[in-house]
Amino acid sequence: MAEVKVSGPAYEALVLAQEEARRLNHSYIGTEHILLGLIGVAEGQAVETLLAIRVEPAMVMAAVEFIVGKGERPSDKEVALTPRAERVIGLAMEQAPWVGRSSITTLDLLVALLREPEGAAAGILETLGVSLSRIARS
């Protein structure tokens, strides 16, 4: 089996996740930051899918900021992925070969966020009415 890569819009989403963690003054990159990164990639399948089920990026942003909040001051440490965020990326990488791809998409990341039920992003998505079955139907 070929090695699965993170490139294109999925890579851009992960870079944006790091920027979102810094913007919120968090010292970690969690699943909620990956979710924010996904909505920041305009041409990504994740955003298109969310819009198809009537979930606007602004709704996601407001929900994340309301639920996880903003830190009091910027962290002077390097922001690193939490174990759950690492698991989400791993789940996305496991999924890609099943559908014949050698790199992950933003949709793979969105599905992986939902498949990691203990992550903050899964709870936020659930609150917004996003589920694996709704994504599959879109």
Image: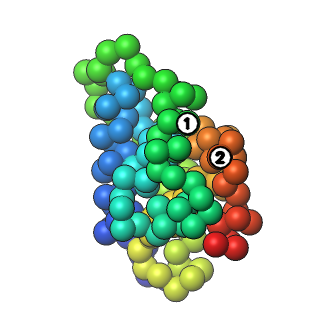
Q: Is residue 47 left or right of residue 9?
A: right
Q: Quadrant of residue 137?
A: bottom right
Foreground residue among 60 and 74: 60
Q: Earlier in the sequence, mark 1 or mark 2?
A: 1
Could you tell me the amino acid type at mark 2?
Leu
Residue 6 seen anywhere in this rendered image of the structure: no
Residue that lies at the very extreme toward the bottom in this rendered image:
100
Residue that lies at the very extreme toward the top in this rendered image:
72
Q: Residue visible at 38% across and 45% down?
A: 17
Q: In which quarter of the image is residue 42?
A: bottom left
Could you tell me the amino acid type at mark 1?
Ala
Q: Residue visible at 62% across and 63% down?
A: 53
Residue 63: numbered disc: 1
In terms of secondary structure, where does tag 2 sit? loop
Question: Which residue is the site of mark 2?
Answer: 128
Question: What percent of the width, then of the height, locates residue 76?
Answer: 25, 21
